[in-house]
Amino acid sequence: MTSPTRPEDALDLFGEPAARERRPRRRRGSVIAGAVAATVLIGAGGAYATNAATAELPAASAVTLEPVSRTFAAPALAWPAYGSGAVAAVGLDGTEEDGLLARYGSTDTLPTGSIAKVVTALVVLAAKPIAVGTDGETITFTGADVQYYAETLAESGSNAPVTAGLQLSERQALTAMMLPSANNYAKSLAIWAYGSEEAFLAAARSWLDGQGFARTSLADASGLSPATVSTTAEMVRLGELLIADPVLAPIVAMPTADIPGVGELANTNSLLGRSGVDGIKTGTTDEAGSCLLFSLDASVEGQPVTLVGVVVGARTHPQLADDVLTLIPSIEAGFRSVPLTTEGQDYGSLTSAWGEKVAAETAQAQSVLVWGAASTSTSVVLDPVETVADGERVGTATVVVNGTSYELPVVVDGTIEDPGFGWRLAHPAELFG
């Protein structure tokens, strides 16, 4: 019996045809493998193209301005050679404590003289406010008020006439107190509003505490007492409150007033209408000397500025008036407009990975009004951006002036546009890292 033929021997029995059948199978396998490889490559290429077309672009590289600092010198003020004083600008932070622009002389409490009537007027209005468009309540004066008048005359104090049965509006009575600085009207108003001088003084203390006047103290309504004291800084703040009051500000700006039953009253402030002065209150006692709390509206660099100042301790009011008129221009000269930025000021640049470069700058000039010595510093932060339109904000310039920060928008001059599909396809490293 013949032994079984091996598989390979069996195939040989068929000769060449059997051998030819194996070769086409190898070609089909190669074709299939090539097709699969091509499909994979095409798929991978398509996926890359899709990813490249939609990938987030790299942020433009930023070059920013180095921090810049500037300083401006302090002005020299023409303070008098005597006494003490202070000055502030309403709404403008000063370089001194208490928001003052400047001060000289003593910072201790000092007798106020009739500047105390500023407190009296404000405290009376706190109890008896005058509605807009009215003159307030009607006050009927009595024999007690006539007695206050007699006492004032005996003290040689500033005064205005009063008679029993006289009727004045509250506004008229305040005018009689403030213009001629009538001590008797200060006492009459205080007692009318609060019932007694003691009750008025208690109310004044409470009001002063509530307003933050820790170093101002009233011992009387008129300021004749040397125990009625304040600091020059707090006197200035009192002046700021008065000129903000719609009832009192017009009163202290009046050169004269004709009040029926009282007569024509002249304002003791001889500077009204000179150098822009429109208030506020004089004061005179042996202890305080001649004093003036004044206000004026000035124009500085085209901007309106309201100044409030005080000088105390002069020998006479004419001397004081001359010295304040000399002082005022030196105060005004201390203001300057400090530029925060100029139009188109260069703050750096942005450069894209595909070579487009734009300048980072400010859109418009901006400045801030300061007084006295000033220091400024500028720093810039640019935001990460990939593309940007002309004029679009791309960062912030921070300018610090005397400790106050101002943030200014930084925009671009020019555009950075999408580089297109071709650049994306050719720069995988920039797109995908």
Image (cartoon, grey):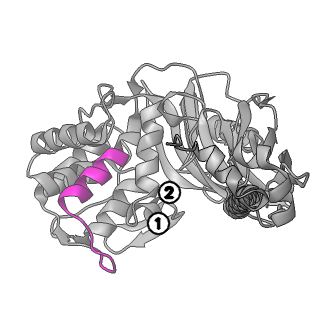
Q: Does residue 131 belong to the magenta stretch?
A: yes
Residue 202 percent across, percent down from the top left: 14, 39
User: Which numbered mark, 2 or 1, is in the foreground of this view?
Assistant: 1
Q: Residue at x 14, y 57 (%)?
A: 192
Residue 300 visible here: no
Residue type beneath disc 1: Pro
Residue 60 percent across, percent down from the top left: 78, 48
Q: Nearer the viewer, residue 334 or 251?
A: 334
Q: Secondary structure at mark 2?
A: loop
Q: Nearer the viewer, residue 397 or 177?
A: 397
Total count of labels? 2
Q: Residues within 10 Å of mark 2 (few under 14, many from 20)?
A: many
Among the 4 quarters of the image, the one containing residue 310 = top right
Residue 23 percent across, percent down from the top left: 76, 57
Residue 11 percent across, percent down from the top left: 66, 52
Q: Secondary structure at mark 1?
A: helix
Is 323 drawn above or below residue 351 in the view shown? above
Q: Does residue 371 belong to the magenta stretch?
A: no
Q: Residue at x 31, y 36 (%)?
A: 212
Q: Which residue is mark 1?
A: 250
Residue type beneath disc 2: Asn
Q: Is residue 35 left or right of residue 316?
A: right
Among the 4 quarters of the image, the one containing residue 364 = bottom right
Is 167 drawn above or below residue 431 in the view shown? below
Q: Which residue is mark 2?
A: 267
In the image, which residues are magenta?
A: 117-135
Q: Is residue 401 left or right of residue 278?
A: right
* Residues at marks 2 and 1, CA–CA distance in whole angstroms: 12 Å
> Which quadrant: the C terminus?
top right
Q: Residue at x 33, y 26 (%)?
A: 226
